[in-house]
Each structure stands twice: as structure tokens, then as C-alpha cells.
Image (cartoon, rainbow, N blue to C red):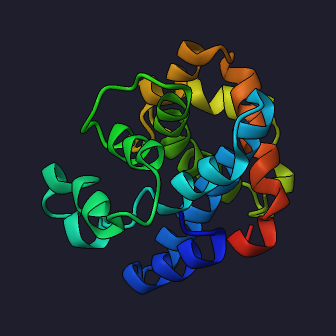
Amino acid sequence: MINRQQAWELLNEHVKTKNLIKHCLATEAVMRDLANYFGEDEETWGIAGLLHDLDYEYTKNTPEEHGLKTVELLGDLVSQEIKNAILAHSGKKSRDTLIEKAIYAADPTTGFIVAAALIKPEKKLEAIDVQFLLKRFKEKSFAKGANRDQMASCEKFGLSLEKFYEIALNAMKKISKELGL
């Protein structure tokens, strides 16, 4: 299996959009902290998060291929567990395992948290807290692209939305410099 550095290089080879790279970094951070919380393999979960949108720039106009192209690009470089997580996040397979459920919920959450930070005058993750996120969650007009059902699916793997946001926000705060937030 490839290591984190090789995954990072692969991401930069296939993804040129700065904000998409930041989204992948944020998803990696959230997945690593979720793995740590659940006692799972942090490296596996992190690489799944880092590479989950590897094909996005190729498939943005053909969403039916999203995830499938990533698995094709990855070949034998990663485990089947990572490939399944990537397929599950894009709806190309059912979400059966913990990693598959976690990445599905984490994906829109990173964008939601970024949007919450950007509406603050400071435009920093430090300016927001879990209660602020929970309030914004109830506002359907806020961050419309962040699927509320997908984020709330954290309850299907044993986390309240509040605890899930706490883990995700803290994970993203750890890499705030890389995210520019």
C-alpha cells in the first residue's frame, strides 16, 4: 500500500484546484481523528480521506463516474478497504463498514465547517465552535450544498451530530494553517 507521502504526490498529480486539495486535506484530517476515536487504522482512514476526490476534476461533468475513476487510477496502490470507502462516499456501493459510513458523513462536513468559518469576520476556524455549527445546521439556506442528511448519518455509526462536529472541527483546527483558515 502507498504511504501518505505517495498519496499526497498522487493527489497533486491529479488535482490542480487549490480548494479541492484543501477539501481533501480537511477530509483526511477528519478521517484520521475519527479513526483515532474509534480505534481504527489512522493511516488507512487518512489515505481514504486524502484520495476520496482524486478523480473529481475528471468526473465533475460525469458524476456517474465519480469514485469509479479513482479506483481505476489507484489500481493496486491501495487496499480494497480504501477503494470501498471511496466508492461508498460517492454512492457507488452501499455503506456497510465503519470507514465507509464515516467518509460519507465527513465529506460534506468539511465544506460546511469551512463555510461557517468564512462567514465570521476573522475567517478562521478558531472563531467557530460546535454550538455555532449546530445553529447553522438548522438554517437550510446556509451552505446549501452541504447535504444535511449525509452529515447527520454520523448517528448511524454511533456519534451524535454534536460529537461528530466536535471531532471534525478539532481535526480541521489542527491543520488550519494548511487550510488557510
Residue 27 vs residue 180: left or right? left
Relative to 172, does residue 19 appear above or below in the rendering? below
Residue 117 locus on image (x, y percent): 70, 54
Residue 114, can we see it?
Answer: no
Residue 13 locus on image (x, y percent): 42, 86
Residue 58 vs residue 48: left or right? left
In-front residue for pair 116/67: 67
Relative to 179, does residue 144 appear above or below in the rendering? above
Residue 35 locus on image (x, y percent): 71, 38
Q: In which quarter of the image is the C terminus?
A: bottom right
Residue 113, can we see it?
Answer: yes
The residue located at (29%, 72%) in the rendering is 57
How many dots with numbers? 0
The residue located at (48%, 25%) in the rendering is 97
**Residue 145, quarter of picture:** top left
In-front residue for pair 30/176: 30
Residue 113 vs residue 38: left or right? left
Residue 61 locus on image (x, y percent): 15, 64
The residue located at (30%, 58%) in the rendering is 71
The residue located at (13%, 59%) in the rendering is 62
